[in-house]
Amino acid sequence: MDLTVNIGHLKLKNPVMTASGTFGYGEEYSEFVDLNMLGAVVVKGISLKPMEGNPPPRICETPCGMLNAIGLQNVGLKRFLKEKLPYLRAFDTKIIVNVLGNTVQEYVKLAKALDEAGVDGIELNVSCPNVKQGGIMFGTDRKALAKLIAKVRQAVSKSVLITKLSPTVSNIPEFARTAEENGSDAITLINTIPGMAIDAETWKPRLSNITGGLSGPAIKPIAIRMVWEASRAVGIPVIGVGGIMNTEDAVEFMLAGATAIEVGTGNFLNPLSTVEIVNGIWTYLDKKGISKVKDIIGGVNGESNSHNLNH
């Protein structure tokens, strides 16, 4: 069974990746998950300097999902390169680093340093909804997005460049095309959707930040629709994320047009979900008599996503 897929010039052994911010830096999950089994590990978002994030409470459960307002807490670039990256290098899996900044220059500096350090991929986080400045602007303004991707593209020569688009725009195909036209090798869809929860007893918001990002099964139908729309609009691979808890969810995203998928909230509920999905895809293909996972990409209604590059 051939589970390999291509994201730009990057060949993944299977289409299962981790979603940024839900898997730490990989090491936190390594006692539960054999990282060698994953197509790629996408580490939590990295900024130039360390960030403490928002005060607690920062996570709360909601019907069919959860809200988070972690606030992009991370160790910063210097510590990531010194402490976190060497650990990941011991595994036979691709390393993709999610990056975030408040200015184009910050993104460029981060991307250049990571590219020179030899990471396999860089995922631009342009759509974090719980940050008061920076990300939201790039993700919802096509001119700003175009400029950002073009500048980062110039700074990156070896790593695959992926743009994680914001779901809070009215026309996702347009933003997908903007990413493609300015040099992004792939796009990730979707990030969390802004939401809010209130405690009816205390009359207080359940998050200290008041609003947060909604993830989990509640957003899956929206994510699948956006992946389907984007994959028909561009020739670059689409990475699907949003409420993927099991094999069936992953297959659904691939049928909609996703070349690969990222598991996010699923990691909190079941630390083994990524590995179970890898094995599940193998079993699913075997049962269907399909020898290559690429053959199901964009298969909804008998449509084939064969126009996509690298399939």
Image (tube, rainbow, N blue to C red):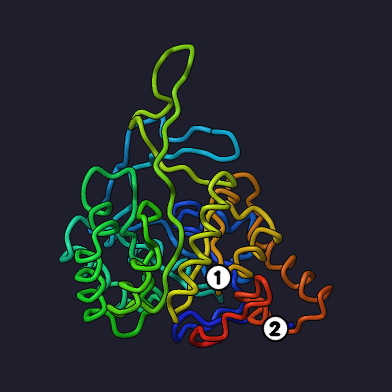
Percent x, y of residue 265: 55, 48
- Disc 2 or 1, which lies upstream in sequence? 1
Query: Residue 131 falls in which quadrant of the image?
Result: top left
Instruction: Give the residue displayed 47% in from the left and 42% down from the top.
Output: 214
Residue 30: name its quadrant: bottom right
Residue 65 in percent (x, y) is at 56, 40
Q: Residue at the spot x=36%, y=34% of the render?
A: 211
Spot occupied by residue 209 in the image (x, y as percentages of width and height): 33, 32
Q: Residue at x 63, y 81 (%)?
A: 294
Give the structural element (helix, strand or loop) at label 2: loop
For label 2, the residue is 292
**Quarter placement of the C terminus:** bottom right
Relative height, residue 161 to residue 245 (above, below): below
Above or below — where is 258 with respect to 44?
Answer: below
Q: Amino acid at mark 2?
A: Lys
Mark 2 packing: few (<14 Cα in 10 Å), some, or many (20+)? Answer: some
Mark 1, residues whose alpha carbon is within 10 Å: few (<14), some, or many (≥20)? many
Name the kind of residue labelled 1 in the image: Ala
Quarter of the picture containing the N terminus is bottom right
Q: What SS does tag 1 mark?
A: loop
| Residue that badge 1 annotates | 258
Query: Residue 151 vs residue 71: left or right?
Result: left
Q: Position of residue 246 (x, y in %)?
A: 68, 56
Distance between mark 2 and mark 1 Cα atoms: 15 Å
In-front residue for pair 15/54:
15
The one of 249 and 43 positioned closer to us in this rendering: 249
Residue 267: numbered disc: none
